[in-house]
Amino acid sequence: MTIYTRIMDISVTDFKQRCLQIIRQVERTGAPVAITRRGQVVAQLRRPGPATSSSDRPVWERLRAAGGRLLASPSESVATDEDFGALR
């Protein structure tokens, strides 16, 4: 099997037949694989990023990583003291 430095395209049918071999290749080389159906990419197989516990990071950083946009500073609150009193 040839190892590519770019994303390798493979059909769903070929992926089913060679699944473990392809997973081992991605694990070994780090090169992602695009899985296609009728010429359209339907999934990608790639190594996971560095493992970090989401609870280790502040909430605003977790939101930022999820594509959210933080409009207030971490110390600001959108709830008032009356809102907290109403919840008791």
Image: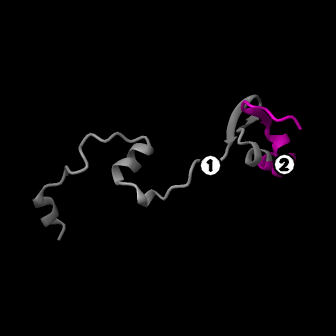
Mark on residue 48?
1
Q: Residue at x 62, y 49 (%)?
A: 48
Residue 36 versus residue 49 in the image, above or below = above
**Horizontal placement of 16 versus 60: left or right?**
right
Q: Residue at x 51, y 55 (%)?
A: 52
Question: Of 17 and 20, which appears nearest the observer?
Answer: 20
Q: Most extreme residue toward the bottom, as rendered?
A: 88
How far separated are the C-alphas under marks 2 and 1?
Answer: 18 Å
Q: Residue at x 72, y 38 (%)?
A: 31
Q: List the residue tagged with mark 2.
A: 21
The residue range painted magenta reads: 1-24
Q: Residue at x 75, y 28 (%)?
A: 39
15 within the magenta span? yes
The crowd level at tag 2 (other Cα within 10 Å; few <14, some 14-19, many 20+) is: few
* x and y percentages locating residue 21 in the rendered image: 84, 48
33 within the magenta span? no
Which residue type carries mark 1? Pro
Q: Earlier in the sequence, mark 2 or mark 1?
A: 2
Residue 50 versus residue 10 in the image, above or below = below
Q: Which quadrant holds the N terminus?
A: top right
